Amino acid sequence: MSEKMTDLEKADASTHHSPSTVEIGISEPVNALQRFCNKLDAVCGVEARGIERIPEEIRERDMSLEDYVHMFTIWFSMNCTANQLTLGVLGPVSYGLGLTDSILICMFGTIFGSVCTGYISTFGPRSGLRTLNWPSKLCVILNLAIEIGYGLIDCLVGGLLLSAVNGGGMSVIVGIIIVAVITWVVVTFGIKWFYKFEQFVWAPTVLVLFVLIGVAGPHFDTNTASRGTGAVLHGNRLSYFFLVASGPLSWSSASADYVVYYPKTTKRWGTFAATTCGITSGKLLIEFLGIGLGSGLLLNPNWEQAFENHGIGALVVEAFSPLNAFGNLCCIILAVCIAANNIPGTYAAALNWQQLGAPWAKIPRPIWSTSTCIVFTVVAIAGRDSLFDIFINWLSLIGYWTIIWITMTIQDEFVFRKGDFDWEIWNHRDLLPHGFAALLAFIIGWAGAVVCMYQTYFTGPIAALVGNGADLGLPVACGLTMIVYPPARWLELKYVGR
């Protein structure tokens, strides 16, 4: 992939832009498809650039406080969406935790996962590169699974909300397609539309959430304690903590993609703080509401019946029901704004397809974004009756592999590279590591996760020893990776040389 600058990029390098209006430049065409996308870029602003490194010249500008606030806003908007209600509801409903227990565990789990993602995001401005790259084929495939999985969950939650508002008159399938189409339009146009959409979509969502606090808050159960005692209770607490942590961890494998157009001079601590705080505050605002709704199910028979019959969408509609037509409008806003969570993952997925190899990279990003939207829409329609099973199992699997990858990344930077990276060799396979040590650590870490996982479909032998089962896969995977990777990497450097 060539890094030669076009005239448009050179012209852009001489000016300064805010991140929401930055001119992204047109990549050098390699085939008819790329030339077609470049024409779309020139005519109507469809982002043609794919996985090529963003040259420092076209990112260079003076950073201001406004830029960091913009970065925070993007992350806040991406995470303050209705699908996060599901993660909150799981605390009281699936793990039997009381309101106080659920809120505390949710808060600390979210902070832990957000800190990890905040660290990975700092590589975007420093390198000008997307989060994953050529040698990381296994991670790319796993990340595609994350993004398609979240795509189907987001579409499904939005579809359930729209269908419930309509009293079941609108099919869930129609609702799924509506959310998918909104996602497709923004993602296809690329980073500039993505920035603009995320910069403003948080406002109506937050307003609606404050309305939900007012109308549903009196029905939250603040008195009932967590169910179970001893090892059973501790196991449920651990499982919920690591499940919640897996939510923000899922952003890590794409987090640099969203800040890659920021200049190299961006303060690393600023990127870290904006990302961590944006994710944490966005998720907690809506997850706490989900916990409240879940806690109120046993006190409110109408809520319980709505949830059991039609899922999370009907529960939210029932919570808003005292407001009649205005409550329905609030639900519609939540359903449409859920695209804010779906757009970033779909944007990253289009890049991941290109990272599978040179033949894949020749297909332009807009085509891959279209294909990704089609895939998760079809899967969401097929799995529309199994939201909670999909959500629990999917999030936990995400946490297992991302924590392994993040652990190796931290060790590689601070133990072996000492912070010294050569970003210019990003696509020179003869100079990049073979990845033998990383693969070994990944396999051993994943094996540890398997024997310690507690899922609907499988309970590992170690997980079964704690109460009725506890999901210990994430910390065990992290620990094993931390032990295995350093000596394996040292041997790789000694005998392989890179």
Image (cartoon, rainbow, N blue to C red):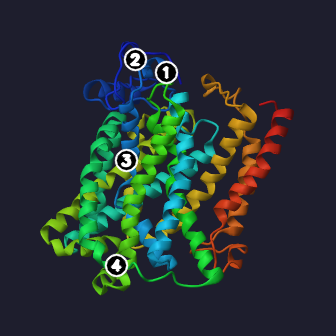
For residue 174, which quarter of the picture?
bottom left
Q: Residues within 10 Å of mark 3 (few under 14, many from 20)?
A: many
Q: Is residue 179 left or right of residue 416?
A: left
Q: Is residue 253 left or right of residue 164?
A: right
Tag 4 residue: 307
Whole-Å distance between the Cαs marked 3 and 2?
A: 26 Å
Asked if residue 463 is positioned above or below residue 369 in the image, the reply reads below
**Residue 51 coordinates in the image, percent (x, y):** 50, 32
Whole-Å distance between the Cαs marked 3 and 1?
A: 25 Å
Asked if residue 133 is positioned above or below residue 101 in the image, the reply reads above
Label annotation for residue 55? 1
Q: Residue at x 47, y 43 (%)?
A: 275
Whole-Å distance between the Cαs marked 3 and 4?
A: 27 Å
Q: Residue at x 49, y 46 (%)?
A: 276
Residue kind at label 1, given as amino acid type:
Pro
Tag 3 residue: 343
Tag 2 residue: 9
Residues at circles 2 and 1 in contact by the CB criterion of under 8 Å: yes
Residue kind at label 2, given as amino acid type:
Glu
* Lower position in the chain sequence, tag 1 or tag 4: 1
**Residue 184 coordinates in the image, percent (x, y):** 32, 46
Residue kind at label 4, given as amino acid type:
Phe
**Residue 140 coordinates in the image, percent (x, y):** 57, 45
Residues at circles 1 and 4 in contact by the CB criterion of under 8 Å: no
Q: Residue at x 60, y 84 (%)?
A: 229
